[in-house]
Image (cartoon, rainbow, N blue to C red):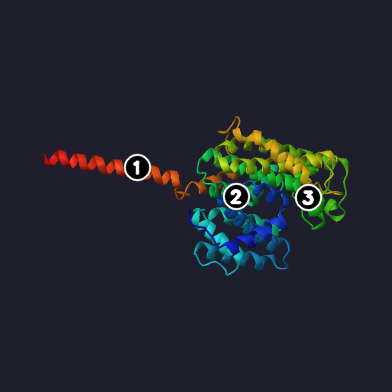
Amino acid sequence: MPRPFANKADIAACRALLCSGSHSFFAASLLLPRRVRDPATALYAFCRVADDAIDLGDDPETALALLHERLDAAYAGTPAQNPIDRAFAATVRTFNIPRALPAALIEGLAWDAAGRRYETLSDLMDYAARVAGAVGVMMALVMGVRDGDALARAADLGVAMQLTNIGRDVGEDAAAGRLFLPLDWLGQAGINAAEFLDAPAFPPALGEVVELLLAEADALYRRAAPGIARLPRGCRAGIAAARRIYAAIGGEVAAAGYDSVTRRARVNGRRKIALALAAIGDIFGGADLHAPALPANMFLLRAAESATWSPEPNGVTKLLNLFERLERAQREASLSGQRLA
């Protein structure tokens, strides 16, 4: 059996955080094989605590400095002595995850801390690439994916999920003084961003903006679909389910007339099960695997090019390698005998 990549107790702590922090991701993760589920859980846990450090802390500047120190320590092989950092350090070492990927996430969190607003959809995509596209690429690397087209589709899926989150959380974000919707779209809809943040409400014109954003997310979910067939077989069902469940959140927002200010869309447990079953048909792929990568994701894909990795061979691979070595030894012995003759 392959050696565990991290301490069991550390992984258990990461799993507890996942269970309480993201019900949709937790549900989808149950369909992943354990060899992927555990490191994916470690990645999620580090991303979650990093996000919480910025969103929930009183001193974002100090929190950012500490996050950079923790990242440096993890990549130096001397992580902070807590289960999340230890499991994360083991993950990035085992799967050779380039430092530029989690660093991109932290850069996006720095934009949050600065209260950055996004003038255009392109600007928003730059943000989504950092806080979610990077996570999609890291997840694919943990699965052993190194194909450029498949990694581009993983980044598409991450960005799609982030756009869904933004569309779902407009009211919640506004209550915290945050606004992620493209400012030019709001202006065209006749909505003053400052006035909206002062008194969050739901005019019909805002629903049209949310609808546009979720349409962009849906387009990316479609682009991501063919990448699922390029994942290892044991990973396809979990990622296909995650794609369906997150897309369904957008569907719930639509069913509420795109009002994500006075209500928060949720997909209940029974529907998640139905979506996971429906996702079985998605594991065989589709068209446009070779669609160009999103410009916002290009720097992530360039970073991932350096992520060479050779998984520990399984029993079948070991047996084939043994046969190959025996055959090579027999050939060398035969040639040696011919030379002596």
Residue matched to label 2: 134
Residue highlighted by disc 1: 323
Q: Nearer the viewer, mark 1 or mark 3?
A: 1
Residue 134 visible in the snapshot: yes
Q: Amino acid at mark 1?
A: Phe
Secondary element type, mark 1 = helix
Categorize mark 1 by other alpha carbons within 10 Å: few (<14), some (14-19), many (20+).
few
Label 1–label 3 contact, CB within 8 A = no
Residue lying farthest to the bottom in this orientation: 81
Mark 3 nearby-residue class (10 Å; few <14, some 14–19, many ≥20):
many
Image side of residue 154 versus residue 144, left or right:
right
Determine which residue is flagged by label 3.
169
Q: Nearer the viewer, residue 83 or 160?
A: 83
Residue shown at 70% from the left, 36% from the top: 278
| Residue at the image point whose x is 82% and y is 51% from the top | 171
Judge whether 338 appears above or below 197 on screen: above
Disc 3 from disc 2: Cα separation: 21 Å
Asked whether, in this view, residue 77 is left or right of residue 188, the answer is: left
Whichever of callouts 2 and 1 sits on the residue coming sooner in the sequence is: 2
In the rendered structure, which amino acid carries the disc numbered 3? Asp
Amino acid carrying label 2: it is Ala
Structural distance between the alpha carbons of marks 1 and 3: 57 Å
Vertical order, 289 against 162 (above or below): above
Residue at point 44%, 43% (across, down): 316
In the rendering, at what x and y percent does residue 115 appear?
72, 57
Give the percent coordinates (x, y) of residue 133.
62, 47
Marks 3 and 2, the one that precedes in the sequence: 2
Q: Residues within 10 Å of mark 2 (few under 14, many from 20)?
A: many
